[in-house]
């Protein structure tokens, strides 16, 4: 009997990390209950500064087009609609729902009351030491629907 070997790499598979969202939600709740809201923001800020350091560097060098590409790619990979409008000094994006919030609810978990910080704190940290700032204009805690704005600092 012959033996067949199948060789697979992670890159051969469709992008999928939905369970990351559930785990992140649980981590935020653990931090919030044990150490408070400040600890959640500190954790997310530290995470964003480290994980998104290359994105921050590109934003600093090349401008808002970098964020536009990142947002469009991320939402496309998550299978969620997003509309983006960009000018030289401003980028505004709108979502009908947050794919992370949708997945957490599908898991029948309570969404952390601080899950909003995965938008506000993370994007704020990405903009640190760049010519840009982030503003969360609106956010629906039930769906994660949002309007967010990046603009040139005065």
Image (spheres, rainbow, N blue to C red):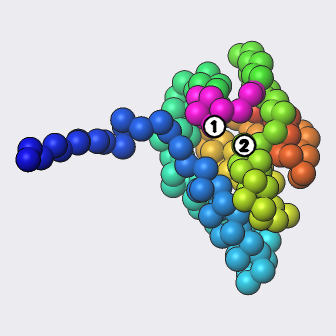
| For residue 7, side relative to residue 122 (left or right) | left
Residue at position x 28%, y 42% from top? 8
Query: Can residue 39 be seen by looking at this rendering?
Result: no
The magenta-colored residue range is: 73-82
The image shows residue 110 at horizontal and vertical percentages of: 82, 65
Residue at position x 77%, y 19% from top? 85
User: How many C-alpha atoms fall within 10 Å of the one at disc 1: few (<14), some, or many (≥20)?
Assistant: some
Assess whether residue 81 is covered by the magenta stretch: yes
The image shows residue 147 at horizontal and vertical percentages of: 85, 35
74 vs 21: above or below: above
The disc label shown at residue 78, or none: 1
In the picture as drawn, the residue positioned furthest to the left comes out as: 1
Q: Nearer the viewer, residue 16 or 153?
A: 16
Q: Secondary structure at mark 1?
A: helix
Distance from Cα at disc 1 to Cα at disc 2: 7 Å
5 vs 79: above or below: below
| For residue 77, side relative to residue 85 (left or right) | left
The image shows residue 121 at horizontal and vertical percentages of: 73, 53
Q: Nearer the viewer, residue 67 or 28?
A: 28
103 vs 152: above or below: below
Predominant secondary structure, magenta span: helix
Q: Earlier in the sequence, mark 1 or mark 2?
A: 1
23 vs 73: above or below: below
Check disc 2 and report the residue beneath it: 99
């Amino acid at each position: 009997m012959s033996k067949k070997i199948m060789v697979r790499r992670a890159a051969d598979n469709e992008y999928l990390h939905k369970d990351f969202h559930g785990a992140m939600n649980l981590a935020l709740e653990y931090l919030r209950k044990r150490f408070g809201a400040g600890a959640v923001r500190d954790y997310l800020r530290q995470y964003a500064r480290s994980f998104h350091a290359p994105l921050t560097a590109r934003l600093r060098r090349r401008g808002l087009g970098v964020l536009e590409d990142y947002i469009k790619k991320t939402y496309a990979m998550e299978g969620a609609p997003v509309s983006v409008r960009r000018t030289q000094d401003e980028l505004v994006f709108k979502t009908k729902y947050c794919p992370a919030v949708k997945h957490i609810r599908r898991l029948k978990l309570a969404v952390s009351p601080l899950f909003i910080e995965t938008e506000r704190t993370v994007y704020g940290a990405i903009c640190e030491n760049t010519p840009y700032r982030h503003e969360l204009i609106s956010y629906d805690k039930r769906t994660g629907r949002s309007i967010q704005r990046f603009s040139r600092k005065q």
